[in-house]
Image (tube, rainbow, N blue to C red):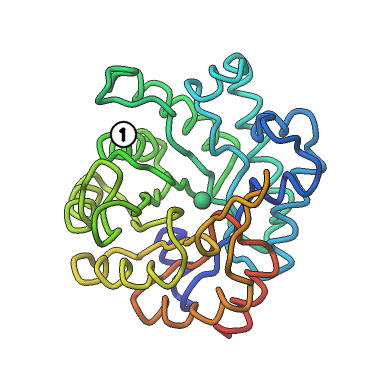
């Protein structure tokens, strides 16, 4: 029995909400590396997963979304890859304190494989390096998230699987006429099939759109997959107001659709950009 089966034995699992906006609220300067903050302001970073656990999250992620060597390199932090990932895992494990499980976040490299900016071999190397550090630090599972390229997602998935931990793999669906394709044009059936064949323990979608449209996407996943589905929509569509990005759905509006998302087949529900601890608390009220 994996940690995923164990969590799902008690019904839908509430994950966490956004990190970036929460770190900014706590003083992370715009343009500063969020992952680098693990080294400089661990106490501030720890407030984020702690707020989600207090709000009712059963699963919290880690502040390691951009902590693969390639993404860190562009911020001049490549030599800190070990410390940033290890401390990121330790921060969330401390905040979870046995009350929630910690799923380590692995995001995209920021390089485009198809344009020759990186190679499959290089991606394999950097994702294995990151996954191994996170696994050694004691996380419960790994989440490959916000992926836009299925080829890169599968490489990251394989790298995470070699740690022996359960792995969730989710992609952004925000392209095509019906907004149900990835940026590279893959549809849900292709994504579900290829990620399942590559050994994912759960699959799904995050970021890109709000919860209403992700209910449809979740239904399409459920129609073609038996794996647990992981869905983390944004708090509506981001709008730029002066210099500030705002999201148009309130925690209550977002949470009002949580039940429909579970009925559409989601096993893990939470929020991506623009969601906050209050969103998770409101979801908890709706689902319990
Ligand atoms: Zn997002």
Q: Position of residue 207 (x, y in %)?
A: 46, 54
Foreground residue, 37 or 217?
A: 217
Q: Secondary structure at mark 1?
A: helix
The answer to whether residue 143 is left or right of residue 116 is right
Please report the residue visible at 52 percent of the width from the left and 43 percent of the height from the top. 105
Q: Is residue 212 above or below residue 61?
A: below
Q: Please tell me in which quadrant of the rendered image residue 79 appears.
A: top right
Q: Position of residue 188 (x, y in %)?
A: 23, 57
Q: Position of residue 205 (x, y in %)?
A: 38, 57
Residue at the limit of the structure toward the front, as seen here: 242
Quadrant occupied by the C terminus: bottom right
Foreground residue, 282 or 59?
A: 282
Residue position for label 1: 152
Q: Position of residue 9 (x, y in %)?
A: 44, 75
Please report the residue visible at 54 percent of the width from the left and 44 percent of the height from the top. 104
Please report the residue visible at 64 percent of the width from the left and 52 percent of the height from the top. 241
* Circle 1 residues within 10 Å: few <14, some 14–19, many ≥20: many
The answer to whether residue 232 is left or right of residue 196 is right
Q: Is residue 279 above or below residue 184?
A: below
């Amino acid at each position: 029995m994996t940690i995923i089966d164990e969590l799902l034995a008690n019904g839908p699992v509430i994950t966490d909400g956004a990190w970036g906006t929460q770190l900014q609220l706590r003083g992370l300067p715009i343009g500063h590396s969020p992952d680098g903050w693990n080294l400089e302001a661990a106490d501030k970073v720890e407030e984020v997963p702690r707020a989600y656990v207090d709000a009712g999250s059963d699963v919290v992620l880690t502040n390691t979304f951009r902590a693969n060597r390639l993404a860190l390199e562009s911020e001049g932090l490549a030599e800190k890859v070990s410390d940033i990932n290890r401390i990121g895992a330790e921060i969330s494990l401390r905040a979870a304190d046995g009350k929630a499980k910690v799923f380590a976040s692995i995001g995209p490299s920021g390089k485009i494989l198809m344009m020759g900016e990186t190679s499959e071999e290089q991606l394999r190397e950097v994702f294995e390096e990151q996954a191994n550090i996170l696994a050694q630090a004691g996380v419960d599972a790994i989440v490959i998230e916000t992926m836009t390229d299925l080829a890169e997602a599968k490489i990251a998935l394989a790298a995470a699987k070699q740690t022996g931990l359960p792995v969730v793999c989710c992609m952004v669906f925000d392209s095509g006429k019906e907004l149900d394709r990835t940026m590279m044009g893959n549809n849900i059936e292709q994504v579900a099939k290829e990620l399942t064949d590559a050994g994912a323990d759960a699959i799904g979608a995050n970021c890109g759109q709000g919860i209403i449209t992700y209910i449809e996407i979740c239904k399409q996943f459920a129609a073609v997959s038996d794996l647990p589905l992981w869905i983390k929509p944004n708090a509506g569509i981001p709008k730029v107001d002066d210099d500030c990005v705002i999201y148009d759905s309130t925690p209550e509006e977002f949470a009002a659709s949580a039940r429909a998302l579970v009925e559409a087949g989601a096993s893990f529900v939470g929020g991506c950009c623009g969601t906050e601890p209050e969103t998770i608390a409101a979801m908890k009220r709706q689902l319990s």
